[in-house]
Amino acid sequence: QVQLVESGGGLVQAGGSLRLSCAASGRIFSVNIMGWYRQAPGKQRELVATITNGGDTNYADSVSGRFAISRDNAKNTVYLQMNSLEPEDTAVYYCTYRSLRDYWGQGTQVTVSS
């Protein structure tokens, strides 16, 4: 089992920044992919960004150039730096860990006011 604990969500004005963190614990394998998804009210959950243990990244087009994903393998922690936030970024953000199977965090609310 893997446990994911997220932090860093909150309320910010448009144009502002937030940094999300997600710490994984439990049965961690060295080969894994961690990332972030989000779900806005009335919409399906969507990919935001992922990063492999080797540092390869993948971003949704809607956040490319504004968000940056990174990780600290020694701490089993993934980060999402979100800049130039827009009201459309308002959603619950979920951390994910993928190795033998997928695990999800409990979600953290990000609200961007206009």
Image (cartoon, rainbow, N blue to C red):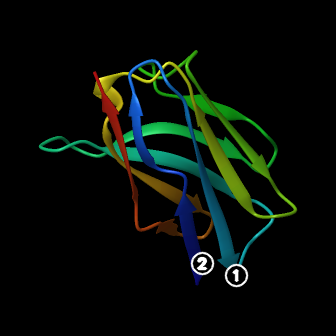
Q: Residues within 10 Å of mark 2 (few under 14, many from 20)?
A: some
Q: Is residue 64 above or below residue 106?
A: above
Q: Is residue 71 above or below residue 82?
A: below
Which residue sits at x=76%, y=63%?
76
Q: Is residue 111 above or below residue 109?
A: above
Q: Position of residue 97 (x, y in %)?
A: 58, 61
Q: Mark 2 sits on what residue?
A: 2
Q: Mark 2 is on which residue type?
A: Val
Q: Mark 1 is on which residue type?
A: Arg
SS at mark 2 in the image:
strand
Q: Position of residue 86 (x, y in %)?
A: 37, 21
Q: Are marks 2 and 1 in contact (CB under 8 Å)?
A: yes
Residue lying furthest left in this view? Answer: 42
Question: Quick check: 83 left or right of 104?
Answer: right
Q: Which mark is residue 108?
A: none
Q: Position of residue 82 (x, y in %)?
A: 55, 31
Q: Position of residue 10 (x, y in %)?
A: 42, 47
Residue 83 quadrant: top right
Residue 49 quadrant: top right
Q: Residues within 10 Å of mark 1 (few under 14, many from 20)?
A: few
Label 2 vs 1, first from the N-terminus = 2
Which residue sits at x=31%, y=36%?
90
Question: Quick check: 69 left or right of 73?
Answer: left
Nearest the viewer among 95 and 89 is 89
Quarter the C terminus occupies? top left
Q: Mark 1 sits on what residue?
A: 27
Total number of numbered discs in the rendering: 2
Which residue sits at x=55%, y=19%?
66
Question: Quick check: 29 left or right of 10?
Answer: right
Marks 2/1: CA distance? 6 Å
SS at mark 1 in the image:
loop
